[in-house]
Amino acid sequence: MTLNNTTQITTIERHILDQQHHYPDASGALTNLLYDLALCGKIIASKVIQAGLMDVLGKTGGENVQGEEVQKLDEFADETIYKLNDHTGRLAVMGSEERPDIIPIPPKYKTGKYVLLYDPLDGSSNIDVNVSVGSIFAIYRRKTPEGSPGTLADCLQPGKELIAAGYIIYGSSTMLVYSTGNGVHGFTLNRMLGEFLLSHPDIKMPAKPKFYSVNQAYEPFWSPGVLRYVRYLQTGEGEPEKLGLSLRYIGSLVADFHRNLLGGGLFCYPADRKDPKKTGGKLRLLYEAAPLAYLAEQAGGYATDGRQRILDIEPTSLHQRVPLFIGDKNLCLKAEQYIKKFDGPGA
């Protein structure tokens, strides 16, 4: 991307419209929904870059449905995404990682054929120390009849039913990365123009992984299979050549995933025995694992809970948690092998 050669400039609006041509029967509703999410990203980014200058840092004093302290920017991001999408007539229902129940469309507005699930600000515990954070979104087609209010059933769909997913990362620059099933594309926000411009077309995970990302502090609480697997990542145990992976862990899922998507590698957050809430995993299936798994597979990668493909998991609750191994396909499949061999067949 360069502003010296206008033939190379592609705005996100133009790109989304071009993608729409893959679907001759498209009404344009999904195109507009994606553009609305890009607008959400611009608004949230405008607050994130002022953290420390405005009263947007720190906690609200409340807890979300996960029992986690809510940051002020969490609340702002959640409200921004909701208010820009509740009245458009494109959505049947929404769901947010910050709210306990589904978010119905107000009765005074029409409902549409899409479902939006989102994590408004992933990694928000890192805001106060200026670490990259991000918003994650997942879009499905509704299952219930159009014209009626959306229901929980519309939200509880496996990731393989996704029609679009993406994230917006707020760091040294603001980037929006998304897919509608035709590859993964990244856009960088040009602050002078106030527009997302195509900077990373058709992203593919590098064939040779460089990094593995895991919170090594939880090692005493991992299963034997996970312990052996992480040792394999460190040493290349049983391989003819050392893997040569470097440990890189930020603790912000979007940031770790983004680095590995561009640089090559694997992020994992296994189940552990330290916290009873995390014995079945920590990350949320609907708001984090599934949309990022969709992007990973579109970029040539893979995602698993250690036993099965993330996109095949049938959700049973709005805030269901899962273990997650995501990134390089071969490394993810190797995780399944180690867990099956050393931990047994499982449930």
Image (cartoon, rainbow, N blue to C red):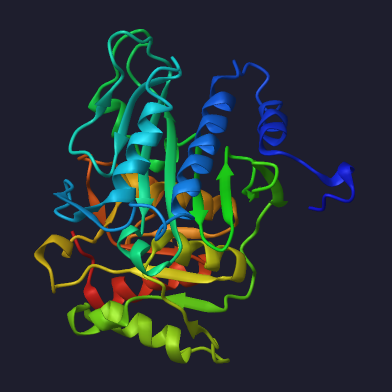
- Residue 191's spot in the image, x, y percent? 64, 48
Residue 252 vs 159, above or below: the answer is below
- Residue 268's spot in the image, x, y percent? 37, 69
Front in this rendered view, residue 250 or 317: 250
Instruction: Say which residue appears at 23% left-offset and 61% top-offset.
Output: 281
Quadrant of the drawing holding the C terminus: bottom left
Farthest-out residue, left: 276
Is residue 201 visible to the viewer in this orientation of the structure?
no
Q: Quadrant of residue 23?
A: top right
Tell me: 327 left or right of 156: right
- Residue 332's spot in the image, x, y percent? 44, 67
Instruction: Say which residue appears at 29% left-offset and 19% top-offset.
Output: 150
Instruction: Say which residue appears at 12% left-offset and 68% top-offset.
Output: 275
Residue 54 vs 146, above or below: the answer is below
Residue 305 vs 213, above or below: the answer is above
Tell me: 51 left or right of 65: right
Q: Quadrant of residue 319?
A: top left
Residue 261 vs 220, above or below: the answer is above
Farthest-out residue, front: 53
Tell me: 285 left or right of 2: left
Instruction: Say which residue appears at 49% left-offset and 40% top-offset.
Output: 43
